[in-house]
Image (spheres, rainbow, N blue to C red):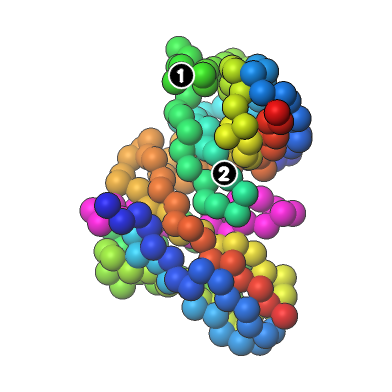
Amino acid sequence: DAGVIQSPRHEVTEMGQEVTLRCKPISGHNSLFWYRQTMMRGLELLIYFNNNVPIDDSGMPEDRFSAKMPNASFSTLKIQPSEPRDSAVYFCASGAGGPPETQYFGPGTRLLVL
Amino acid sequence: RKEVEQDPGPFNVPEGATVAFNCTYSNSASQSFFWYRQDCRKEPKLLMSVYSSGNEDGRFTAQLNRASQYISLLIRDSKLSDSATYLCVVNEVYGNKLVFGAGTILRVKS
């Protein structure tokens, strides 16, 4: 079975540019999570969806970040405009429901903003 | 105070050693607890859930002490392949939100 799929795997962009990260959750999972991981702050939850509806976006750092889940098989995380401090690994994870719930992580997108 | 605190390590141990990691959490109402493993430049993966009665999976044993808000992971007979970062994870009371500790680095050497 395919796991969580993320694209792109690597992204290098310049400050001010728009960045769009994509995620395809595991088929049948109804929860989707976006995380950001940095050396300084560790793994932080940005936002999560349940049945395509955003449930908790309290971790979204500021208005430059937005996330959508138009259907059960696709989600995007957009940063506009990007800044160097947004450089991190962004993980998408999906889960089959709970609580408690096991989350399955995608391989991540490594973002570098110059 | 962080919601989930771990000793960052690194723990450098020889093959065959027994090593223990500890973790404390601040929310006494937390209900579910996990250990995840993250290899270098990879995604986190669930290692095991942690139950009040304690649970064992091969060389790995997890314990939970609710009174002390303390979680532990014991690895016996360490293998080189156990080298990774071990993340202590707590499920918030409501919803499916997981809170991750910063991780403990384990390096097993021959």
The image shows residue B69, relative to residue A95, as above or below, that is above
Q: Name the kind of residue labelled 2 in the image.
A: Gln
Q: For mark 2, does the 10 Å Cα neighbourhood hold few (<14), some (14 to 19), or many (20 or more) residues?
A: some
The image shows residue A88, relative to residue B77, as above or below, that is below
- Residue A23 at x, y percent in the picture: 40, 66
Q: Which residue is mark 2?
A: B38
Q: For mark 1, does the 10 Å Cα neighbourhood hold few (<14), some (14 to 19), or many (20 or more) residues?
A: few
Magenta region, residue range: A26-49
The image shows residue B96, relative to residue A13, as above or below, that is above
Residue A28 within the magenta-colored segment of the rendering: yes
Q: Nearer the viewer, mark 1 or mark 2?
A: 1
Instruction: Identify the residue at image location x=31%, y=56%.
Output: A2
Q: Which residue is mark 1?
A: B58
Instruction: Tell me the element at label 1.
Output: loop
| Closer to us: A21 or A7 | A7
Quarter of the figure with the N terminus of chain B? top right
| Closer to us: B63 or A62 | B63
Instruction: Identify the residue at image location x=62%, y=49%.
Output: B40
Is mark 1 in CB contact (under 8 Å) with mark 2? no
Label 2 marks a residue whose chain is B
Instruction: Tell me the element at label 2.
Output: strand
